[in-house]
Image: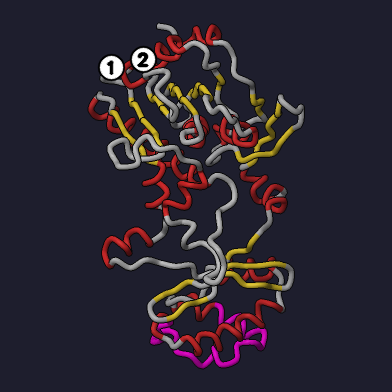
Amino acid sequence: MKMLEGVRVLEVADGLTDFGGRILAELGADVVTVVVDENRDHARQLAWHHGKTGLSADDPEAIRNLSRDADIVLDGQRKGDRFDLASAVSGSDKVIYVRVAPFSVHGPYADKPATDLTLFALSGLAHVTGEPSQPPLRFPGEQVYALTGIQAATAALLALQARRRTGKGQNIDVSAFQSATLSNYREAIMYEWTGRIGRRMGNMLVRGKSGVRQIWPCKDGYVTWSMIDNPSMMRAVVAVMNECGAAGELLSIDWDNTLVADTPQETIERWQGVVERFFADHTREELGKWSLERGWGLSVVYGPEEVRESEHLRERGLFVDISDETTGETKRLPGPLFQTPANATPSRNFSAPIPSASFKRWSA
């Protein structure tokens, strides 16, 4: 049995709730989605709406009726309030109503238009992404919409847990702007407490007085690892380097009594040069295996196609084959959030929105 089996979710999707509804569907909820985005992104439709049941938006009263029978309503309407779902569920003390908007409904930006790109920029994520001497960069995909969907699903799950204890639903407001800002690693908290505004550091993780590299080239690609204040990790890396005759001066360092964050930058650069030469002589597979066996904290960087074809992820059942009824093609997309023997997920079809008459099973 899946975690949310028997839970009914009505989602009005306009970008902000789409991924949240997708999470709830993967957890076993019966999710009905009404897509109201006038400029529907087909890739988003396919990736974030498979596993849901589509409902056409041409019968507002039918949608209002469904909201009253739902356990959770994810309301992502941005252009007006065509369905007036807040009023529809106001008489119920059981429904969990999650209103998701670009900005706080009580803030100075309330009702202002927004896109994933503008929210990304306003949140400060673009300000700290990229090289210091270059323009800001945007993450691939619609990251702010995804982050907002995660917060919407999290809020719904917390409210569902509270309802199981109290018997009462809740009204919840989720701001996409706030969701993105609070995901901005430490920048928002740093500004709140110190007034300091962060800046783009490129391939540099700043700790204390100095910065350390994060992405490293190796013999056949890239890996991610940083020289941080973790003595056991540093000893493990240096031990393997020594076995390969490549540890150099790193072998003589007392890592238990060395604070990397307070080490002069020129010294760190010299140490990193030793690591760089070692990584360049070895493949991702070699480095990744050493990391797993010896506790390096290193991760291999894979490209999109390598991720799709990963034997490890295939065995975990992460990807499912989705039939795209618009093009007739089959796409391999992320499926279950986690797998147990009881919730193995078969291939699915992504269906176009269907008439509301098909939803008699929701009737009292």
Give the residues drawn in magenta, as a range. 237-260
Give the class, few, some or many, for how many residues have Cα within 10 Å of label 2's Cα (few <14, many ≥20).
many
Left or right position of 28 against 218: left
Closer to us: 179 or 262: 179
Tag 1 residue: 92
Closer to us: 179 or 287: 179
* Residue 307 appearing in the image: yes
Closer to us: 6 or 342: 6
Closer to us: 47 or 247: 47
Horizontal and vertical percent position of residue 93: 26, 20
Q: Is residue 218 above or below residue 307?
A: below
Tag 2 residue: 68
* Residue 187 lies within the magenta run: no
Secondary structure found at label 2: helix
Residues under labels 1 and 2: Cα distance? 7 Å
Q: Is residue 279 above or below residue 124?
A: below
Horizontal and vertical percent position of residue 357: 54, 6
The amino acid type of the residue labelled 1 equals: Ser
Q: Specify the principal SS of the magenta part.
A: helix
* Residue 295 appearing in the image: no
Cβ atoms under marks 1 and 2 closer than 8 Å: yes
Q: Which quarter of the rendered picture does the C terminus lie within?
A: top left
Residue at 67% x, 84% y: name it.
244
Horizontal and vertical percent position of residue 59: 49, 10
Secondary structure found at label 1: loop
Residue at 32% x, 64% y: name it.
190
Q: Earlier in the sequence, mark 1 or mark 2?
A: 2
The amino acid type of the residue labelled 2 equals: Arg
Residue at 54% x, 38% y: name it.
340
Left or right position of 195 against 353: left
* Residue 238 lies within the magenta run: yes
